[in-house]
Amino acid sequence: EAILLEPKLSMPYNDLGIHYCHNGDYTRGLQYYDKALELEPDNPDYLFNIVQTYMINYPDVQKLRKWKKSKVYKEAMKLSKKAVTLSKDDFELAQDYALNFFAAENFDVKADWGDAAEAWQYARGLARSDAERFNAWLNEARVWMRLKDSGKARACLDESVKIQPDSPVAKRLLEELVSGKVGE
């Protein structure tokens, strides 16, 4: 009804995109997302919503868009980065973008771990609580471990332990780093 009354209003299209995608009708859902973004291409919330659909429901997106799996990921990352750029002080968007680097292997794509480290540093700068800062330090450490930079990984883990000294995850990652058995 909202679309009938005001066809240039983007929000109902976005909301219908969410509705249909959540109910498994990706054809209609993606059409509505596309229309919302056509009307308001710089809306970070709309970008976030379509990124979630791309990342979670990539087999359906791949089929409907006629894209390779790697293209689904690359498009999602491009849109995720755009959302962060448009909403520079939104921790959730920054964290989501940083987390998306860890999904690269699911799409047979090699992540740019240097960009991932920068993304975690940026997210940490927006963190509003010790818990958010802890997770940003911890995930940045994981990035440095993937880059085999034990010095930077250790510095991040040390910072995470300062926030949560009893964290079993931080302790385990420190042990892996010290023993040289990272990811085993």
Image (tube, rainbow, N blue to C red):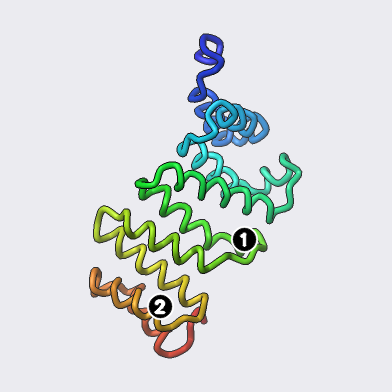
Distance between mark 1 and mark 2 Cα atoms? 23 Å
Q: Is 183 left, or right, of 134 in this rendering? A: right
Q: Is 36 left, or right, of 165 in this rendering? A: right
Q: Residue 153 at x, y = what percent? A: 40, 77
Above or below, comparing residue 145 to residue 95 in the picture: below
Q: How many residues crowd around disc 2 within 10 Å: few (fewer than 14), some, or many (20 or more)?
A: many
| Mark 2, secondary structure of its residue | helix
Residue beneath disc 1: 106
Of 157 and 173, nearer the camera is: 157
Above or below, comparing residue 54 to residue 157 in the picture: above
Q: Residue 94 at x, y = what percent? A: 42, 52
Residue beneath disc 2: 153
Of 70 and 123, nearer the camera is: 123
- Report the mark closest to the observer, 1 or 2: 2
Q: Residue 172 at x, y = what percent? A: 37, 79
| Mark 1, secondary structure of its residue | helix
Task: Point out the residue furthest to the top here.
Answer: 5
Amino acid on which disc 1 is placed? Asn
Number of dots carrying numbers:
2
* Residue lying at 24% horizontally and 60% vertically, measured from the top left: 130
Q: Residue 7 at x, y = what percent? A: 56, 15
Above or below, comparing residue 6 to residue 156 in the picture: above
Which of the 4 image quarters holds residue 87? top left
Amino acid on which disc 2 is placed? Ala
